[in-house]
Image (cartoon, rainbow, N blue to C red):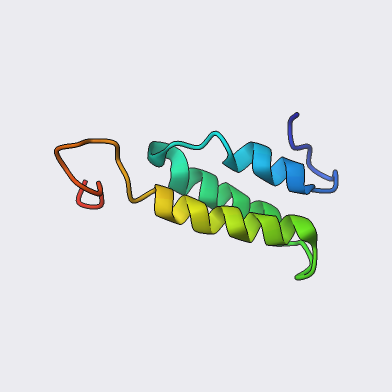
Amino acid sequence: ERIVPGRRVTVEDIRSLAGPSTPHFALQTRNRLRRLIEPLAEDDPARAEGERQIAKLDVLANFSGDPRSGTGADH
């Protein structure tokens, strides 16, 4: 399901956006999630899930999948 502007963001929206992310796109997905949860209240479950997913994406971004380069951080 597509995230529609003006519609309430749900935990499932957050999971569906973050779930299929790869190391290559992790930072782009993380930034999109940050923009999506920014207006949500601190106690909103979707915001909490967004923050958890952002932390996972930060870790995922450190892996390029290139066995020659280690973490990919030097690319």
Q: Where is residue 56 in the image (x, y as percent from the top left)?
A: 50, 53
Residue 73 pos. (x, y %): 25, 52
Residue occupying the point 62% across, 60% down: 51
The quarter of the displayed image where residue 58 is located: bottom left
Q: Which residue is drawn at 73% across and 41% down?
A: 13
Q: In this view, does 43 lie to the left or right of 14?
A: right
Q: In this view, does 53 lie above or below 21?
A: below
Residue 68 falls left or right of residue 34: left
Farthest residue, direction right: 7
Residue farthest toward the bottom in the current orientation of the protein: 42
The front one of 11 and 27 is: 11
Residue farthest along the left direction in this orientation: 68
The x and y percentages for residue 48 are 70, 62
* Extreme-top residue of the structure: 1
Quadrant position of residue 50: bottom right
Residue at (79, 48) in percent of width and height: 9
Q: Residue at x 53, y 44 (%)?
A: 29
Number of numbered discs on residues: 0
Measured as percent of width and height from the top left, residue 10 is found at 79, 47
Image quadrant containing the N terminus: top right
The answer to which of 57 and 34 lies nearer the viewer is 57
For residue 23, above or below residue 34: above
